[in-house]
Image (cartoon, rainbow, N blue to C red):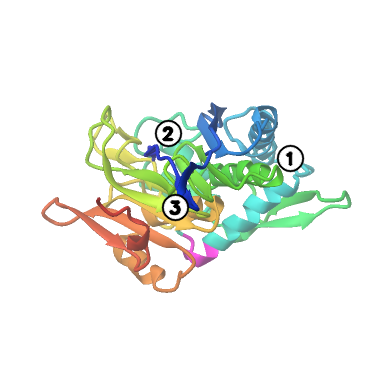
Amino acid sequence: MRFCLVIAVALLFFSCKEKEVEVAVPEAQQFVGNAIGTTYSIKLFADEEIQVKAEVDSIIDMFNNSMSTWVKGSLINRINAGEDSVLVGKPFKEVFEQAQVVYRKTEGYFDPTVGNLVNAYGFGADGKQERIPSQKQIDSLKQLVGFHKMQLVPSQVKDSFYIKSSQKGMYLEFNAIAKGTLVDYMARLLDQKGVENYLVEVGGEVVTKGMNLERNGKWSVGIDDPNQKPMQRQYITVVELSDKAMAGSGNYRKFKIDPESGQELVHTVNPLTGMAQPSEVLGVNVIAKNCTLADGFATAFMAMPLEKSKELLQNLSEIEVLIMYTDRSGLLRFETTPGFQGYVKQAG
């Protein structure tokens, strides 16, 4: 899901004795580019010119060559091809361990080993099938799903690890969480450079720090209206963030129609049932302390039934969530955690 930054320009004036003194606001610095099949943008404020383009590109290359199933010869593709001597580094380890957290806390509704099923429906890097897989195919591929069957094993090389699985033929993919980690890595780069006010966005996932000094307020981020048409860009609400991350997931843009049955196939596959069928949930947005967790949880809540989401959210105090769904009459409804409303931008 993509977001729009809502930017208002403001000048700050402070009183000094009896004179009005204009306080200089650093000019915004902006960087844009391509990343992992989508785009990125960075907006920051600093007293001096910050150079980040080359280092950001280096981070993107590292993620592509390590965790992208869309890059031939990447480490994750070599693991999926059955190589048992592939060494992975700390970024891969971080994504793996954060994915384990989301896997456990969502009771398996977020599962990075669902890749074989995703490919069977034609949504993955290896997906070639255009029609719905048979129930027999689904039942067979479900046997290769289960993140608990994989483990991270330290190697004798410092800060390097092996990925071991208890079952051959499993397909690991981090496409539903690695983008969030990429945003986190870009944000850490800015932290290392001493930048105190910024917004980093990759394909709609965002991390914010400090304030948007142009408007002397928090960073405003719009949330897509799930009922908009494909070429439209309408927003259901705007949230204001500072020192928080937000990620979203939605099926209303990513789907295909089975040519034989005419049935709509959504890109989110339920790891427990193996099905990629539409549900009442149209879109999810998650606010968290980092974008990795926000990204993973957003995917999980898209895969699970609404009532299950409500049940799990009672014990997930570290995140705030907006779930957009349709009721039995087809009307758009909203389910939020108690704290989410505090982030919604108030009118006026």
Q: From this viewpoint, is residue 311 visible?
A: yes
The quadrant of the image that shows the N terminus is top left
Count of numbered circles on the image: 3
Foreground mark, 3 or 1, reads 3
Point out which mark residue 83 bears.
Answer: 1
Is residue 107 found inside the magenta-colored segment of the image?
yes
- Going by the image, does 42 lie left or right of 260? right
Instruction: Depth check: give the residue in front, 281 or 336.
Output: 336
Q: Which residue sits furthest right?
A: 156
Q: Please, what secondary structure does the residue beneath circle 3 have? A: strand
Task: Please check the rendered image and state whether residue 133 is part of the magenta-colored stretch, yes or no.
Answer: no
Please report the bounds of the magenta region as a residue range: 103-108
Estimate how packed mark 2 is, as few (under 14), some (14 to 19) or many (20 or more) residues with alpha carbons within 10 Å.
many
Q: Which residue is mark 3?
A: 241
* Coordinates of residue 346 in the picture (x, y in percent): 28, 54
Measuring 51% from the left and 48% from the top, which residue is drawn there?
Answer: 208
Mark 2 or mark 1, earlier in chain: 1
Please give left or right for residue 13 compared with residue 72 in the image.
left
